[in-house]
Amino acid sequence: MTVLSERMDSVRSVALGLWVRQGRVHEDPAESGVSHLLEHMVFKGTRRRSARDLAWELERLGGALDAYTTHESTAFQARVPAGELDVALDVLCDLAFRPLLDERDLEVERDVVLEEIAAAAEVPEDVAFEEHARLLYGGHPYGEPILGTRASVRSLPATALAAAHGRAYRPDNVVVVAAGAVEHEALVAGLARWLPDRAPGSAPEDPPAPVGGTGFRRLRSPGGGQTHIVMGGLSIPYRHPLRYAIYVTSTALGGGMSSRLFQHIREERGLAYSVYSFHAFFSRAGHVGAYVGTRPETADEAREALTGELARLAREGLTEAELDDTRSQLKGQFLISLESPVARMSRLAGIALYGHRYRTLDEVASRLDAVDRDQCLEAAAYFAPDRLATLELAPEPALAGSAPIGR
């Protein structure tokens, strides 16, 4: 097991997290969504605690308990006052390693996840990104929804959850991280007390690197008043040396109100309320791109404006002034974010999960300062429109003679 901690003398709380190397990429296609459903199910109770007890153990202290699933891992997190680390360790280890996984609870929680899928389907921007991921990754697990589908969630048996739990929820497949008012020796001692004695197993297999797709696809969505346009392409994995240049380039393109996309598409041309760039890194790949939401009647103009800015970035890169300003922006954001124990905990988890070397805050600032225009031009090439997949989600046209609701 990997155990990391970072002491922060200025805070009076502890953020504790337990990351299991089990996510969407580790699932069989017929069992898509099993990692996320399992994340829900472990909260339904253990041999020692009911579902309410698991929450109340920390909430009575003023703390909180949370969890989430990604494509490559499942995380369970607790935030407690200083001095309550052992309680948090007990609860997290209990729910993660000793859940009941009762068939009766599964029927209830299955309905909860189906409601979650239904809620996501009613957010057009989320639907656009989900469909874009499918278009870009072409069937690779990185492009498939973490929640699974309605059909897969309805058909998942309790035996599939138990099998996934038995394979992945082992101490040797887990990263434990704490940040805040914590002593590392106390963390290790607590884990020795509460962890199960479970034999090591084989490491989960990561999928092969994706190939990636390009092209244009238009979908129609009932209701809504905006067209959502997502343009993105494959880039680099987490450990690639160009990662910091991607951070800088993406931020200059669309990472704030002063960015190129915001200034040109929103402020100068009034084509959108929301426009931004995005980037993500996985163990075997990554992607970059940009999004704009606009009225149907201005969709062509907004898409052309977005394409033009991406082409200009790929062709010219960043100016020296943009590079200086964006490096300063990122260093400031990084320093501000790490005032939070949760942010420091999450940073340590990423370092452990992806085998990355730990760097101090000063070392990270130095890495950002070392990013130059040539590196940014190399990073900008990943935003070139001809290597991107474009997904446009437009509202269904109104029927002739019909009036909008409420008129």
Image (spheres, rainbow, N blue to C red):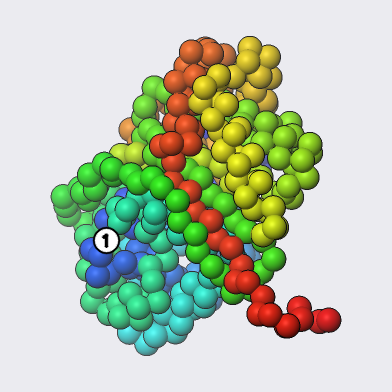
Residue 284: x and y in percent read 30, 39
Q: Give neighbour class at mark 1: few <14, some 14-19, many 20+ (Cα, 10 Å).
A: some
Q: Is mark 1 on a helix, strand or loop?
A: loop
Question: Disc 1 designates what residue?
Answer: 27
Identity of the residue drawn at 49% across and 72% down: 117
Q: Residue furthest right?
A: 407
Above or below for 290 versus 78: above
313 over 32 or under it: above or below: above
The residue at the point 60 percent across, 46 percent down is 303
162 and 81: which one is in front? 162
Please, is residue 245 above or below residue 4 in the view? Answer: above
Q: Position of residue 155 (x, y in %)?
A: 30, 80
Q: In the shown orientation, is residue 318 left or right of residue 99?
A: right
The kind of residue tagged 1 is Glu
Residue 365 sits in which quadrant? top right
Quarter of the figure with the C terminus: bottom right
- Residue 289 vs 382, above or below: the answer is below
